[in-house]
Image: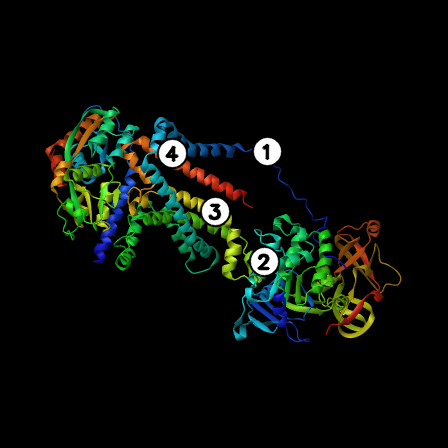
Amino acid sequence: MTVGQTVLGAAPPLGVPLLDAHLVVDRGAFRLDLPLTIDPGEVVALLGPNGAGKTTALRTLAGLLPLSAGHLTLAGRDLDHPGRRVWTPTERRPIGVVFQDYLLFPHLSALDNVAFGPRRHGMNRHQARHRAAEWLARMGLTEHVRRKPRQLSGGQAQRVALARALAVAPALLLLDEPLAALDARTRLDTRAQLQQHLAAHAGATLLVTHDPLDALVLADRLVIIEHGHVVQEGSAATITAQPRTDYVARLVGLNLYRGRATGHSILLADGFRLTTGDQHDGEVFVAFPPSAVALHPGQPDGSPRNTWPATIAGIQRHGDNLRIQLTGPIEVAADVTPAAAAQLRLTPGQPVWAAVKAAETRAYPAG
Amino acid sequence: MRAARFRTILAAFTVLAVVGLTGCGGDSADPPASGDGVSGELTVFAAASLTESFKQIGQDFEAAHQGVKVTFSFAGSSALATQINQGAPADVFASAAPANMKTVTDAGNGDGEPTTFVRNQLVIAVSKGNPDGVTGLSDLTKPDAKVALCAEQVPCGAAARKALDAAGVALTPVTLEQDVKAALAKVRLGEVDAALVYRTDALAADAAAEVDGIEFAESAGAINDYPIIVLKDSANKAAARAFVEYVLSDTGRSVLTAAGFQAP
Amino acid sequence: MPRTDGEVARPTTAVPPTRTRRTGRTPVALLLPAALGLLFLVLPLVGLLVRTPWATLPQRLTEPGVLTALRLSVQTATLATLLCLALGVPLAWLLARVQFPGRRVVRALVTVPLVLPPVVGGVALLLVFGRRGLIGSWLDETFGITLPFTTTAVVLAEAFVAMPFLIIAVEGALRGADTRYEEAAATLGAGRWTTFTHVTLPLVAPGIAAGAVLCWARALGEFGATITFAGNYPGRTQTMPIAVYLALETDLEAAIVLSLILLTVSVVILASLRDRWVSAP
């Protein structure tokens, strides 16, 4: 208990973010430049494709990698500030980390794994074990306290790792792909539990993931980075409604294009023209879900304003439907039911006609 | 000063490397059978203390008998005796002690009776200039004196025991070395103040620069005989006999006495 | 909300992984040299056993010098192993975990005692720790300590020769260990020393144990450096290998008996330790 009070006792007054950082890392061709603030109790998800700099950002926060520039202030303390020659090593930062494959110490029981942190923070062995037992009970693992990590299932190990990170009452909790190592079924349960524990955590939480579902379920706010830079930031609702890059669009399952709008007509970069229901002038994004794309064996007649010939490049199962990747004047993903796919006898390389109703597209300013 | 120490170091390395490695030597091709006369290859197993003198004698012998090639294997006499009894191909065995010779002849591996060709006597080896002023065995019993002896299992140790008993001196050494060269090396390195070694070893060219050999009266009671013999399984007995005769000749003996050995 | 597990279902490109079939048969090409290797190692032991004078064995075992040498051997080998652990584990850690200029050279230097003839190693120790050695002369003048011909010298000689075995084993274990556990420990507030003692060491404990066993066995059999640096005196510096060597000068059977005792004791100790480590959780 004392640990938590100590750490959060140093928290800045309300309205000031608990974490205030500008993470800059120069590593040859790669440069991470990520401003990041997190409020007390807030869960922020850091999303991005592989190589975007998510792990680098997490490592700078944990003190496993020094910043090249910028600053990192947590609970009012400067932890890393190259400009002022300030550096706090990992073991003196008020943080907790849940690693991707948990990294539970194989030679220690679940209880001693969780007690490890409190012990290092000045508790005696008895107090630390007591604290650890409380946390494991909270995780529903009371029966497993004596087990070694290799005797735990994936979901149990994940909860032990979470308990271990939370047992030091960190001002900043870092989660690195916390559900990636689990199978789909376990992930569902564990995600739900994780959500409860994160909601109860009074400090700041940063969740690094490439799984948008984790991000949307667990986080209050999403920060999306590509090539080391923030490409979009905001609530789940904003981002799913108005993605601003291909990556984000794919992430939230939308087809996304950028172009120049004149009224309802948008001229895309490669000369293709889309008609939308919205009315704009100037640079815009236009987006529509794969389910809005209909496929036809020949040129369709009737209402759709946007039709074009395309070729099937790939077919994947996607939930209950099939997702069809199309090439042609624009790259498009289309969702069709298996029945429709069978009826159309869709195979890779096959030419089809694609159609999108103007009313199902959305355009919004790119500026 | 520094250079002198370096030479000491080098010399000590050489000595000990030889001591440590000689056990591995001694393999040679089977000597080709030569019908009559003295020719072909000859393998001589000789005690380590004979190294310098026998190398010289070997060269002289080869010069005197064109067509003979002499190969030596120098090692501790007991090791050589074991090798011979285990069937090592050798023509001549020169031992530093009658006991090791007896091992070979008892096993029936000798051809005829062994002949004593030289004797060796113990001296007290001390650092050059005799800094502690040692004059006899009794000086070695002083409390601070560090003395190396050979282990009693090897000839120089047995001889030392005999000499000490004869003198009635109770001496506690700091170490019982595995052979005479090792005992001498401890003096050369300054690790002990004195060691009982063979006079020939103290006089050997590489040691004489750093070591003085102090003669002592009681050594007469512990003189070591060196016997030599032609081996039964020799494939070149003519050459083997010629070599033994050469060692016993005046020419051979002069080389040995120059090295510090005494005539029997 | 779509999921992005696109890798899974791409029937056009997915190739089922071919599995190598495992059969119960052991290839002859391996079995033959393996059997030869075993014979090569075991036959000399058989040779010893064949020549063992079983009738006089009990009597020889109770000879006072034998037990003294045996006790000294076990004691010095154990002390040497402890010394190697105290100095070798940190050195192995340095070699495995710290980038510093000349690390390759240091690593090569560490293995020098492996290739150096032990007798030369003994001389080298004399030149450093001897009465007139680089450090030994200072020890002698300052504290009146002389190391050669003491039991300490036996331990030093054995440690010198055996330490590389420990270092190589532990360095290998450290290189194989996952350093991310150390990072995890740091995030939990553990400093470098605590991390080393509470995380790194337990993780590489099997490697350390294996290294210590090798180290102990090598120290137990050590002869050349010991007799050169520490000399030979019963009860003080005469270890079993030295007793064996000197027995060989006069009495082959005694040498064989001593060797068998040494072998038996070492095998029993190593086997019991191994069982303990293997059964440990």
Image quadrant in which the N terminus of chain C is located: bottom right
Q: Position of residue B45 (x, y in %)?
A: 24, 33
In the image, which disc is placed on residue C24?
Answer: 1
Chain letter of disc 3?
C
**Circle 2 sits on which residue?**
A126
Q: Nearer the viewer, residue C73 or A18?
A: C73
Chain letter of disc 1?
C
**Mark 3 belongs to which amino acid?**
Ala
Q: Is residue C47 visible?
A: yes
**Mark 4 belongs to which amino acid?**
Leu
Q: CA distance from mark 2 to mark 1?
A: 52 Å
Frontmost of labels 1 and 4 is 4
Whether labels 4 and 2 belong to a single chain: the reply is no
C32 relative to B143 in the view: left or right: right
Q: CA distance from mark 1 to mark 3?
A: 32 Å
A192 relative to B191 in the view: left or right: right
